Every structure is written in C-alpha cells, then in structure tokens.
Amino acid sequence: MAVDPDHVGIELDLTPGIAVAADVLAAIDRDGSRSISEGEAQAYRRQVLDGLAIDIDGTPLSLELVNGSVPEVDAVLNGEGTMRLYARAALPRLAPGTHHLHYRNSHRSDIGVYLVNALVPASERVAVVRQRRDVDQRDVTIEYTLAADLATRALGALAAAVAGAAIWLAARWRRRAIANSSSLIGCR
C-alpha cells in the first residue's frame, strides 16, 4: 500500500496455491473455456475490489481499479500464476498532522493468506509512523503524519511576515503619536 498526500495506491498480488487453484480458476473462468477473457478478468478484479474496505480517519474511501494482469491458466493450475491488481483511492484534502488509514481485505477469507505492508512513501510530506495488523493480516491500520505542502508553508510564512510588518508599523505609528502629543504638551 502506497500512501501519498492526495491518494492511496493498492497493489495486490493474488497467487492461488495448487490446493485451491481449480476453485479460484472456476471463479475467474466463468464459462469454463480454460482461457481467461478480458471480461472475465475485469469481473474478477471487481469482485476482489468489492472485498476490500478502506477509510481515512473513519471516512470511507472509494477504490478505483487502475489496471491489472492475469496469468495463463496453466500457470494458475500449477500454483505459479499471479494475478496483479492495481487500485487507487483519492484522499480528501487533509490537514497536516497525524492520520489513520484503515484497510481490510475480506476477499476469499475462507482460503486466503494475507500479507500487507505500507510502502516507503514517495512524498517527503508523508511519514509512516506505525502499522497495526490483526494476526491474519487481513486488517491493517497505518498511522502516518502529513506535513504541510509547500504552498501552505509559503502562505504561513507570508502571513507571518505581513503580521510582523503590521506590528512594526503600528508600533512606529504609536511612537510617533506619543512623540507628537508630547511635543504639543510642551508647547502650551
């Protein structure tokens, strides 16, 4: 799982072992032709995605299938065929600070063995702090921190500079006002 400031990328590798290969293949090759059509592959990818749930700070996210690949039937039956699936979920605009990304995989929990990890973030704004998994690794919560983006930091610096200049001008105006009132008092 790859966490970026504006999206989460999920890469799944599904490799059915020999003991379950025929069962998994039957779920993919719906017409029993011993070949996997693009339509069958798409339908199975959708089925896999429907078994995933992901949220950020408790707000559910929608996964969008990006692409994937399907192995040859013989490779699946030999326990060597890996179906790859790439999905993505857009994140809402998040404030800088700590966030919790929760992921759950319920696809084929009757036969599935899972391994899930957060990848090293590509963005310097994201730092993974902790990963908490259940014993089956079907469920993981990734705690990460998000730093402010460059525009926000620049805007903050600009606001601080403007505030500093306003304070300086106000102090200078006040000193002049005091000096002018003192000179008027001395003239009477």
Image (cartoon, grey):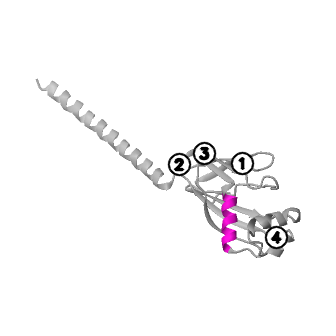
Q: Earlier in the sequence, mark 2 or mark 1?
A: 2
Distance (Cα) linking label 2 and label 4: 41 Å
Q: Which residue was labeled with disc 4?
A: 76
Q: Secondary structure at mark 3?
A: strand
Q: Which residue was labeled with disc 3?
A: 99
Q: Which residue was labeled with disc 2?
A: 94
Give the magenta part as a residue range.
Answer: 38-49
**Majority secondary structure in the magenta region:** helix
Q: Secondary structure at mark 2?
A: loop
Task: Look at label 1 and name its amino acid.
Answer: Val
> What residue do we see at 79% from left, 55% from top?
114
- Asked if labels 3 and 2 touch by Cβ distance under 8 angstroms, the answer is yes
Q: Which residue was labeled with disc 1?
A: 140
Q: Earlier in the sequence, mark 1 or mark 4?
A: 4
Quarter of the image that includes the C terminus: top left
Distance (Cα) linking label 2 and label 3: 8 Å
x and y, in percent, of residue 1 in the image? 68, 57
x and y, in percent, of residue 64 in the image? 59, 61
